[in-house]
Image (cartoon, grey):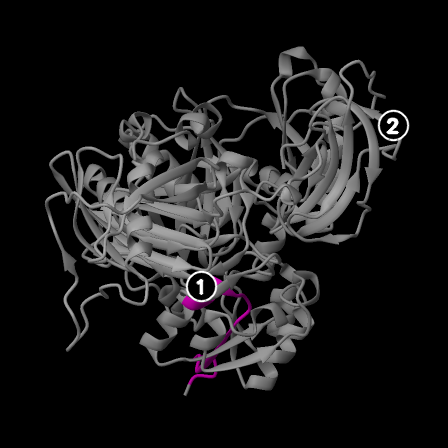
Amino acid sequence: MRSDVIHTLLVANRGEIACRIFRTCRDLGITTVAVYSDADADALHVREADLAVRLPGAAPAGTYLRGDLVVAAARAAGADAVHPGYGFLSENAAFAAAVQDAGLVWVGPPVNAIELMASKTRAKELMAGAGVPLLAPVDPATAGPGDLPLLLKAAAGGGGRGMRIVRELDALPGELLAAAAEAASAFGDGEVFAEPYVERGRHVEVQVMADAHDTVWALGTRDCSLQRRHQKVIEEAPAPGLDEALRTRLHEAAVAAARAVGYRGAGTVEFLVSAEGRPYFLEMNTRLQVEHPVTEAVFGLDLVALQLRVAEGEPLPSPEPPQPSGHAVEARLYAEDPARDWQPQTGALLTLEVPEGPGLRLDTGYTGGDTIGVHYDPMIAKVIAHAPTRTEAVRLLARALERARIHGPVTNRGLLVRSLRHPDFAAARLDTGFYDRHLAELTGPGAGDPATAALAAALAEAVRGPDAVRPTRPGGPAPARFGAWRNVPSQPQRKRYRSEPDGTEHEVAYRTPRTGVPEPHGTPGTRVLTATPDRVTLEVDGVTRHFAITTHADRVHVDATDASYTFTALPRFTDPATHTAPGSLLAPMPGTVVRLAEGLAAGVTVGAGQPLIWLEAMKMEHRILAPASGTLTALHAAPGHQVEVGALLAVVQEDPAATPVPVPVPEETA
């Protein structure tokens, strides 16, 4: 038996990607090993693995980023191979070397390839020698007006950290310092370089797969242009709207890049394509990408299975890749609020149900009842749709997201649905500025009917009493059914709900006569057809509409056929003691205070909108801005402090005539 055959595989990762790799391992008969932090002790990837090893602690730096602990875990569990997934240590050459030094199979590219591509500056020099098209670098020290706009990027790492767009020369020194500081914090390497910023460019990438027998596949293109904070949100394959000559050039450049570093395994060569159709090399990711499922769907492949095959020394199944078929689109479902500066959300994920059906796929690291914590990326799941045409795939994905039941923290589900149905997306008018232009309309009031959904919530609550008619159960009573209006003497009952997260309040009224059958009050054109504690059917202006009702404490989730709503049940009268003092700056999410504006202290004057405090939560930095011009009367935050959501950080006493003290803090785009 060959010594490099994999029998037991440790995945040096967590969440969705660990679960996805385990799925392939089960199909191949490979025993699986999970590693987990204390925060992930009951996580789905731990529950799905055959074996699991604890990494003491919660923060990534002391757990998933500790290569020595991961290698020790592999030895303890009897693993003979390690798969890094994506993120964490997946592109860490020292970790790859340590795995191999321990006598384990490394399911990834050669250490030398990782090293060569680890620095974007070194990678660009190498690609220039291989004939791959590049943007000319710009020396920040000699940059002039003709070089603007510039894009500053961290030489190490990715995910948008250490990245800044500079449109004015006066801002360049400060932005360089900020980018370097963020890069050093995120990757331990503060090197930053500059290149021209391509306005309305598209992010197009090519999936490559290579073996040790001189075969390199270019598995089509993917478009990943819809991004927030330089992180991808919606991806698709193949990239639409590219002519065959451009596709061929991208494929050839990707293969040349892989051959230039002696690549093996799965990798991605990323390009920026200008509005004129000119491609420029960005970087090569020496790992599996988050968006790999769209390529798998189009080519009918399991890329993880191919990674394992190549790691065992086997050749790819054929000299040429299979022919692609159809179109696939992936949406990343995040626990975040796009309308509020993409703030990450935490808490119990009470329900996660995505429709199943032909062409649909769900990759996730969560199930209903799990908790989304503060330590890791806020991605809940990836939903993928595959169909014969792009139009069909986009329609299928949008409808699946719309019909999903997702209860718990605020998510970007509504943004995803509206993005997929936006005219620019439908017409494949794609570029990385999509959300810069369209975010306000995509997060504004939608076409749904929250008032009717609130009425359904109130009616469900009305039949939840001790004498109410319950939902149908085997051997139990049937649900209430009624149609025409009744003239009853009872006084109307009123309920107040607040829509989450926009805060809009709704007051609904109904009557409950002695029969226990509630009737809407003050809503002409609406009548109740059936009502149970978890399902209400209304006829609204002649159209029958169904509402599924789920209650968790004071939160009510209403899932309609075309939209979903979350309400907080409000008391009839508000408590003045719950109001926050004017000018209070509250933590919008749990996190760590990473820095304060220079010179910030009680007694200084600040200007409206001025960045005062920076929080780091779930791999992102978030600015806390002065709500008005005035005097900082209290400061409760300090670097290193852990704060909970709603914690009081500072207080600004408004004074429009105040002259703010200049605070030399560069503009952030983290």
Q: Do we see residue 92 in this rendering?
A: yes
Residue 350 placement, left or right of 139: left
Queried whether the magenta region covers residue 5, the answer comes back as yes
Residue 651 is situated, as x and y percent measured from the top left of the image, at: 77, 35
Q: Give the range drawn in magenta.
A: 2-19
Q: Mark 2 points at which residue?
A: 604
Q: Residues within 10 Å of mark 2 (few under 14, many from 20)?
A: some
Type of amino acid at the residue the image marks with label 2: Val
Q: Residue furthest front?
A: 489
Cα distance, mark 2 to mark 1?
Answer: 46 Å
From the viewer's side, name the closer residue of 411 and 50: 411
Residue 358 image point, x, y percent: 18, 56
Q: Position of residue 339 (x, y in %)?
A: 49, 34
Q: Answer above or below: position of 270 versus 58.
A: above
Where the N terminus falls, by quadrant? bottom left
Q: From the image, which quarter does the C terminus lie in?
A: top right
Q: Does the magenta stretch include residue 197?
A: no
Considering only vertical position in the picture, is 12 above or below 566?
A: below
| Residue that carries the numbered disc 1 in the rendered image | 365
- Compared with 552, 251 (above or below) is above
- Relative image position of residue 423 (x, y in whole percent): 29, 26
Asked whether the beta carbons under mark 2 and mark 1 sit within 8 Å of each other, the answer is: no
**Which label's residue is closer to the chain start, 2 or 1?**
1
Of 276 and 3, the residue lying toward us:
276
Q: What element carries label 1?
A: loop
Q: Which residue lies furthest to the top in this view?
A: 145
Give the class, few, some or many, for how many residues have Cα within 10 Å of label 1's Cα (few <14, many ≥20).
many
Q: Residue at x 61, y 72 (%)?
A: 99
Q: Is mark 2 on a helix, strand or loop?
A: loop
